[in-house]
Image (spheres, grey):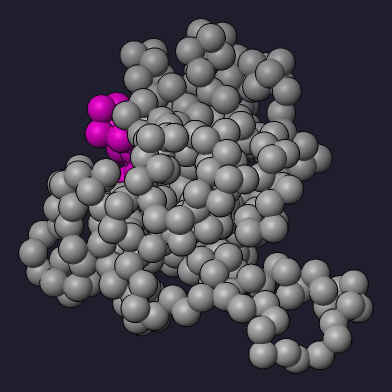
C-alpha cells in the first residue's frame, strides 16, 4: 500500500465492471479463478488486508477473525445476508461489517413467483418431456396443474422481499397472509391487502402456498420443522428463496415422499451445495442452484454498493450499509 490506497482482497470473481472500478480506486487483489477461497487463503487475506470483500460462500467466523491482522478494519460483504459472518466478533475486534441490502428484492421476488408457478403448473415435467422428444400431443388430462388465482399465499417474513412477493401474488389473484415478528404498519398492510397472523402455526393450517422470505438466525433455524409441516394441507406447496436452514430438509423430504404436501420449490438448501438426494427424487420438487438474485443488473448494483461502502469508509465515514450486531 505504498501509494496510500486501501488494500482490498476480493474472495470471488465479480462482474468485470465492478472489478475494474475496484482496481482504479484501491490496491486490490482479485481472484483469477471463480473457485471459493480455501480456509488458508481466507486466513492469509484477513492477515494483511485493510478490507475483505467476501461472499456468502465464505465462512467468516470467530476462529478466522482471530487470525486477522491489525490492518483489517472493514468486511464489505458482497450480498445482503450476512449469516456467514460473525458480526458480533468482528465488531469486538474493531472490524466493521457492511452488506448490500435491497438490491435484489425484485429479482428474488420474481424467482419466488417463478418457483411457485413451476411447481403448481408442473413446468419441469413438461420441459423434460419436450427435451426427451417424448411429447405425443395435447390431451385433456395431460400435465394438469392447479390454478393459483384464489389460493392463499402465506409469507413467512414480511420485509422488503416478502412485500415484493405479496405485490406480485396479488396481481396473480392470490390472497396474501403473512407471519412476521411484528405486523406491518396499517397503510402498508392495507395496500398489500395482507392478513397478519401472530401465530405461524395458525397461518400454516390455512394456506395453500408457503413462501419463506425470512433471514436465517438462531430463532429461525428449522422454523419449518416436522410438526409444522404436518399443519399444512396435503395440497399445499412450499417455496423457499431465502435461506435453506429455515427448513428441516429431512422432514420436508419425508412429507413429500408420503404425499403429506403437494410439492416444493427450493432455491436454497440447508447444507449449501449438498442437496438432500431424497429431494432430487421427487417429481413434484423444483430445485434451483441459488439463482434468486442472479440477474446482471442485480450483481452490478451489489458491486456498486460494495464500492460505495469501501469508498465511504476510506473517506473516514461510516459505511452507509453498516451491519449492526443485534439488529439482524
Q: Position of residue 321 (x, y in %)?
A: 35, 44
Residue 302 appears anywhere in the view: no
Of residue 286 and residue 309, the one placed in the foreground of this image is 286
Of residue 210 and residue 157, the one placed in the foreground of this image is 210
Left or right: 272 as drawn, with respect to 76: right
User: Can residue 188 be found in the magenta stretch?
Assistant: no
Residue 247 appears anywhere in the view: yes
Q: Is residue 10 above or below residue 119?
A: above
Main SS category, magenta section: loop
Residue projecting furthest to the left: 186
Q: Position of residue 327 (x, y in %)?
A: 25, 34
> Which residue is found at the position 34% from the left and 78% from the top?
150
> Which residue is found at the position 57% from the left and 33% from the top?
250
**The N terminus lies in quadrant:** top right
> Which residue is found at the position 30% from the left and 35% from the top?
328
Q: Is residue 198 above or below residue 247?
A: below
Of residue 27 and residue 137, the one placed in the foreground of this image is 137
Q: Which residues are magenta?
A: 317-328
Amino acid at each position: 500500500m505504498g501509494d496510500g490506497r486501501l488494500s482490498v482482497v476480493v474472495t470471488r470473481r465479480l462482474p468485470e465492471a465492478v472489478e475494474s472500478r475496484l482496481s482504479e480506486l484501491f490496491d486490490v487483489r482479485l481472484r483469477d479463478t471463480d473457485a471459493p477461497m480455501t480456509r488458508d487463503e481466507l486466513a492469509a487475506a484477513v492477515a494483511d488486508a485493510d478490507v475483505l470483500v467476501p461472499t456468502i460462500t465464505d465462512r467468516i467466523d470467530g476462529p478466522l477473525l482471530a487470525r486477522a491482522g491489525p490492518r483489517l478494519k472493514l468486511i464489505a460483504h458482497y450480498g445482503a445476508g450476512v449469516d456467514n459472518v460473525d458480526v458480533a466478533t468482528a465488531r469486538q475486534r474493531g472490524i466493521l461489517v457492511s452488506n448490500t441490502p435491497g438490491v435484489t428484492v425484485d429479482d428474488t421476488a420474481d424467482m419466488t413467483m417463478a418457483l411457485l408457478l413451476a411447481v403448481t403448473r408442473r413446468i419441469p415435467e413438461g420441459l423434460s418431456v419436450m427435451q426427451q422428444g417424448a411429447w405425443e400431443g395435447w390431451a385433456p388430462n395431460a400435465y394438469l396443474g392447479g390454478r393459483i388465482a384464489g389460493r392463499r399465499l402465506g409469507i413467512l417474513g414480511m420485509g422488503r422481499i416478502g412485500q415484493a412477493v405479496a405485490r406480485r401474488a396479488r396481481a396473480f389473484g392470490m390472497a396474501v397472509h403473512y407471519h412476521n415478528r411484528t405486523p406491518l404498519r396499517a397503510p402498508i398492510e392495507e395496500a398489500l391487502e395482507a392478513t397478519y397472523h401472530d401465530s405461524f402455526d395458525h397461518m400454516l393450517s390455512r394456506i395453500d402456498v408457503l413462501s419463506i422470505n425470512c433471514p436465517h438466525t438462531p430463532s429461525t433455524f428449522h422454523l419449518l420443522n416436522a410438526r409444522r409441516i404436518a399443519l399444512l394441507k396435503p395440497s399445499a406447496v412450499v417455496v423457499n428463496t431465502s435461506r435453506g436452514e429455515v427448513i428441516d430438509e429431512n422432514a420436508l423430504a419425508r412429507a413429500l415422499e408420503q404425499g403429506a404436501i403437494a410439492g416444493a420449490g427450493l432455491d436454497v438448501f440447508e447444507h449449501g451445495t449438498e442437496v438432500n438426494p431424497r429431494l432430487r427424487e421427487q417429481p413434484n420438487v423444483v430445485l434451483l442452484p441459488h439463482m434468486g438474485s442472479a440477474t446482471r443488473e442485480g450483481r452490478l448494483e451489489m458491486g456498486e454498493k460494495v464500492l460505495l461502502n469501501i469508498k465511504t469508509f476510506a473517506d473516514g465515514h461510516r459505511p452507509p450499509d453498516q451491519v449492526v450486531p443485534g439488529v439482524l
